[in-house]
Amino acid sequence: MGNDKYPSKLLESAVEEFSKLPGIGRKTALRLVLHLLRQDQSEVEAFGNAVIQLKKEIKHCTVCHNISDTEVCSICSSPGRTSSAICVVESIRDVMSIENTHQFNGQYHVLGGVISPMDGIGPNELEIDSLVERVRENDTAEVILALSTTMEGDTTNFYIYKKLKNIEVRVTTIARGVSVGGELEYTDELTLGRSIVNRVTYNDTLSQ
C-alpha cells in the first residue's frame, strides 16, 4: 500500500484521502486527483465547496429521517402525498429507489439500518421507537415494510410487527422474491414498482 512513489507529498495526501472512499482503490484515487489537477481553479473550488457545504448544512427530516435541506423534507411536507401510508426502509438510498418507480404516493420512515447483533446494532440504534410513536399519533392506516430480504431484514420486520401489534394499523410487506438477499437499490424499477403495488399483509408471510 505504501510502496508507491509520489513526486509530491500534496499529491500523496490527496490520493490517501480519496482512497478512503468506498470502492476507490489507490489507482482510481490517483486518476481522480490528477483529473482535478487538470481542471480550472474555480471548478476544483466548486467541487470542494459542494462537499463541505453538504456536510455542514445537510439536515435529517424531523418526521421521516430522510436527508433534507429543510427541517421537514419535501416528501413529508408535500400536500400531494398521503400521510395514511408509511413505507419503512433501511436507508436514504431505498427512498430514492422507491421514488424512481413512481408507484408510491405515501410517506417514508428511514430506520438507518436493520437489527444486526453481529454488528452491534440493536433496536435502540434504529429509528423504530419514533416510527411507533409516529403511527400512534397520526391517522396511519398502513405501514409497509420494505426492508431487504436478509435474516437481519426479516428480524427487523418481525420486531416492528410486534411493536405495532397493539396499534390499529395494517402492516404489509412488499412482494417477496423481489431482491432476495439483496438491497432495494439493486432491484430494477419495474420489478420494485410491482412489488410495492402487489404488497401483502405481513401476518400472511409468517407462515410461508
Image (cartoon, grey):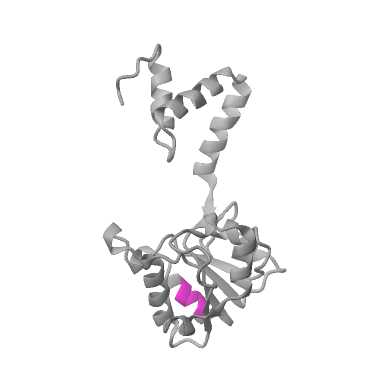
Tell me where residue 9 sits by quadrant: top left
Q: Quadrant of the N terminus?
A: top left
Q: Is residue 76 visible?
A: no
Q: Residue at x 38, y 27 (%)?
A: 16
Residue 48's place in the image compared with 207, above or below, is: above
Residue 39's place in the image compared with 123, above or below, is: above
Q: Quadrant of the C terminus?
A: bottom left
Percent from the top left, x then y, of residue 96? 59, 56
Percent from the top left, x then y, of residue 111? 45, 64
Q: Is residue 86 left or right of residue 158?
A: right
The extreme right residue here reads: 80
Q: Could you tell me what secondary structure mostly forms the magenta stretch?
A: helix
Magenta-span inclusion, residue 144: no
Percent from the top left, x then y, of residue 192? 59, 64
Tell me where residue 19 sits by quadrant: top left
Q: Is residue 30 left or right of residue 190?
A: left
Residue 159's place in the image compared with 100, above or below, is: below
Residue 104's place in the image compared with 15, above or below, is: below
Q: Residue at x 63, y 73 (%)?
A: 197
Q: Residue at x 38, y 76 (%)?
A: 159
Magenta-span inclusion, residue 133: yes
Q: Residue at x 72, y 68 (%)?
A: 80
Percent from the top left, x then y, of residue 8? 40, 13
Q: Is residue 101 left or right of residue 151?
A: right
Q: Nearer the viewer, residue 110 or 31?
A: 31
Q: Which residues are magenta?
A: 131-135
Q: Is residue 17 visible?
A: yes
Q: Nearer the viewer, residue 135 or 159?
A: 159
